[in-house]
Amino acid sequence: MKRVVVGLSGGVDSSVAAYLLQQQGYEVIGLFMKNWHDDSVTISNECPWLEDSNDALLVAEKLGIPFQTVDLSEEYKEKIVDYMFNEYEKGRTPNPDVLCNREIKFDVFMKIALSLGADFVATGHYCQKSEIEVDGKTVYQLIAGADNNKDQSYFLCQLSQEQLSKSLFPIGALTKPEVREIAAEMDLVTAEKKDSQGLCFIGKVRLPEFLQQKLQPKDGKIVQIDKNDPVYTIEKPAGLSFEEELKLESKKRPYLPTMGKVVGKHQGAHYFTVGQRKGLNVGGTKDPLFIIATDVETNTIYTGLTSQHPGLFKKALFIEKSEVHWIRTDLTLKVGETMEVIARIRYRQPLQKAILHQFEDGMYVQFEEAQSAITEGQFVAWYFDNELVGSGVIS
């Protein structure tokens, strides 16, 4: 009998995952991960992890499976929280959920599970796994979840073959309503529970408040750039190589505080991200203002009117060599090779046609249509059809 450790989060998805594994004849153990309990940064008296671990315990009791809590807050702080502060400080926008899966759930947590004699680790993610044979070796595939509205393959875009080989995703072939139905039939306490919002660890903490713990507020200017500014009509010098053209297409625009008019003040450029329109508190414009760039060096936020402002759009992005990650290592591009894929630059974004170009010092992803708010520090993931084959950090 194969043993599976399920990461019970206290939500409906992982509860049903545990139940389904039980039905499939696995020996199931429930483990709750406590990632965060630094009370100095929670902004409400509610204590989400206590409530969640209690729900997870009730589910385990209902299913009659052993249950324990593991405290991973040390590892969490080191691998996720410190990384987040670090990235925000540099003016990048990290994705803690992707990191949390790579560094915590499918690494630290998986090692604990394997030390308990588990053959697999299972989670309540909406994605699927399959395997094929390539040159006589088993290769694992990460497939999108069957529920288009809920597909979470993007959050697992940094997993390795090794991690996938030991993972199970029991609800990947189901839709959310089907999962809730099973939970209700089984009379699980989590059946009606709302989906968790916010970062995978902070729960009830809002990001700016969280960041203010470490990054001191400092006043800076909000500058509005006109859509007809010459910065958007840069002439391409003649005789550029293809690589140089891609570089031009993907690089940051050279904004200066003197290029536009000052429309407001902010508390620190590192609290803001490209594409954001809320939280600027600038009034008096007929159309909404969007952030088109931030500069933590000069502590300036650059904005433009409407979601169609040219400052929001770019046709290409760059991934540094060390940040290019292939789940399907058998498909890795060699220098000079290209590949047609469909890709997304954020969770839930509809997949976009793109071409990957591998060069000596990294990879360019060139989109068929210009993309809005390509954001440094976020992940781009590329797919064949519904299989996620690789990803990288946008530089």
Image: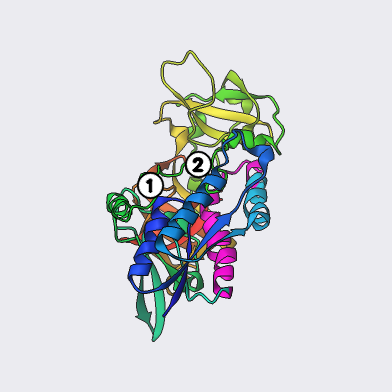
Taking the view exactly as shown, the residue that stands out farthest to the bottom is 136
Q: Residue, x 62% and y 47% (percent of image)?
A: 84
Taking the view exactly as shown, the residue that stands out farthest to the top is 284
Q: Residue, x 67% and y 40% (percent of image)?
A: 39
Q: Look at the image and tell me whether residue 374 can be seen.
A: yes
CA gap between label 2 and label 1 equals 15 Å
Q: Position of residue 180 (x, y in %)?
A: 31, 50
Q: Position of residue 23 (x, y in %)?
A: 33, 69
| Amino acid bearing label 2 | Gly
In the image, residue 107 lies in the stretch drawn in magenta: yes
Q: Quadrant of residue 259?
A: top right
Q: Which residues are magenta?
A: 87-115
Q: How many marks?
A: 2
Asked which secondary structure carries label 2, the reply is loop
Q: Position of residue 299 (x, y in %)?
A: 67, 31
Mark 2 and mark 1 lie on one chain; the one further toward the N terminus is: 2
Q: Look at the image and tell me whether residue 246 can be seen.
A: no
Q: Quadrant of residue 209?
A: top right
Q: Would you name the residue on which mark 1 appears?
A: 348
